[in-house]
Amino acid sequence: MEQLSAGKKLDQAFEKLGKKNSLSFELDLDTDVTSLKALDAKSDPAPGDEIPDDAAKLISGAKITVTVQSKKPIEESGEKDLVGMAMKISSPDGDLAEYRVIGDNAYIRADMDTIGKVTGNPVPAATDLPPEAGAIRNVLEGKWVKFDTKEMQKATGQGSEDGPEPSPSLDAKTQKKLVKAVREVVARRVHLKTAGGGDGTEHITATAPFRTLVTELLGKIRPLVKDLPPGMELPTDKDLKDAPNAKVTADFTLKNGELTEVDVDLAKLAENAKVKKLGLTLRLGKGTRPTVPAGAKKLDLNALMQGFFAGPGMSDES
């Protein structure tokens, strides 16, 4: 009885999300530098390829916030129905990158200095660029730039008569099939338990063996691959045979019947690695609103695609 009641409450909470025209969430990796370095060591990286301390620190503190707005309820929306999207990657020291799409325009800004240091690929100073660099200077200075998404499709050979067609979006009918497939597996393999939290808050914990759950989910999804956008390749059962089958627990927080947070404990999947903390937190209702940023300079896509950096005396590597 508890399993059925908890499952129904989760179904209703997800249905409420699907009926909204806007969906915002924040994704947070709940871990620390020591755990990330332990995971990296378990993968046996080649000498010199170990994860740098700066990168581990950035990843452990990074958050991704996303907001999607549509003309229709989310559950019925395809790509053509979306009117705005915003995504931001931030760290405790500040924002790293932000991307917004509103109408036909896309807007981008990034902390290139920090990204360059973390990846080990330092970027040139904006003052070193030639005059024709234009808005690329703004990119390197962390300022907003914008470009027309249709022009981008033309510049990259998409959407033109001679180029490939844009990738189709996932239609509402296929989305419903995917949801139905996932629900069937979850009902059979996931153990649900409820606990009250007071003030209209309720917690539902879901526990399942990782490899078994993923294998069955993919088994249900594979017949639908033909309806998915091209390029989406699913791992085979053989690919998953070495995946850990430890039980993973997800904690769903509901507030007055609405899903507000999901916490997943992934530490057991690390197996022999000395991981103290490894989890994933999804907070609903938190995101970056897709508004037009002020002062964004237009990016000359033709100059960018033609590679104005590649002047005499500069190698491809440079």
Image (spheres, helix red, strand yellow):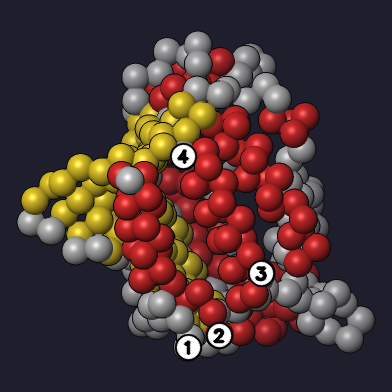
Percent x, y for residue 248? 44, 31
Depth check, mark 3 against mark 4: the one in front is 4
Tag 4 residue: 190
Relative to 161, is 271 above or below?
A: above
Tag 2 residue: 81
Marks 2/1 in contact by CB < 8 Å: the verdict is yes
**First in residue order: circle 3 vs circle 2:** 2
Tag 3 residue: 174
**First in residue order: circle 2 vs circle 1:** 1
x 52%, y 54%: residue: 183
The kind of residue on which mark 1 rests is Lys
The kind of residue on which mark 3 rests is Thr
Q: Quadrant of residue 236?
A: top right
The kind of residue on which mark 4 rests is Val
Percent x, y for residue 30? 34, 36
x 69%, y 83%: residue: 151
In this rendering, would 90 be left or right of 125?
left
Helix, strand or loop under label 2: helix
In this rendering, would 289 be left or right of 214?
left
Percent x, y for residue 46? 66, 17
Measure the C-alpha gap from mark 2 to mark 1: 6 Å
The residue positioned farthest toward the front in the image shown: 1
Q: Mark 3 packing: few (<14 Cα in 10 Å), some, or many (20+)? A: some
Depth check, mark 2 against mark 4: the one in front is 4
The one of 265 and 47 positioned closer to us in this rendering: 265
**First in residue order: circle 3 vs circle 4:** 3
Measure the C-alpha gap from mark 1 to mark 3: 19 Å
